[in-house]
Image (spheres, grey):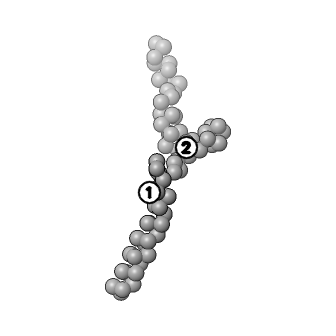
Amino acid sequence: MLITSLIAVIILLVCVALLSISILIKKNGKFPDTHIEGNKTLRDKGIYCAASQDYESMKHKNLEERIKENN
């Protein structure tokens, strides 16, 4: 059991090291922006993430709030 766990941890460390090579070697290496709003094509189509859409909908006032403002 201990040997299996040790082998699994070593494999995991090697995988993480291999995945981070391009970030470490590049001069301005950084993680890619995987957020939906970071994709230009989706932005052009007006597609946003759920959190952003919820935030935008909370900023809009409903009819009752607009009527109260005018009175």
**Observer-nearest residue: 50 or 20?**
20
Using the image, tell me which numbered label, if any, was put on residue 33. Answer: none
Q: Position of residue 65 (x, y in %)?
A: 47, 23
Q: Is residue 58 left or right of residue 42?
A: left
Q: Which residue does the numbered mark 1 point to in the structure image?
A: 24
Which numbered disc, 1 or 2, marks the residue that appears first in the sequence?
Answer: 1
Q: Tell which of 6 and 1 is nearer to you.
A: 6
For the residues carrying marks 1 and 2, which lies nearer the camera in this image?
Answer: 1
Residue 29: x and y, percent?
Answer: 47, 51
Say which of 50 and 11 sits in front.
11
* Residue drawn 43% across the image and 66% down it: 17
Residue furthest out toward the left = 2
For label 2, the residue is 38
| Residue at 50% across, 20% down | 66
Note whether 46 is above or below 11 in the view shown: above
Residue type, label 1:
Leu
Give the image location of residue 37, x and y in percent: 55, 42
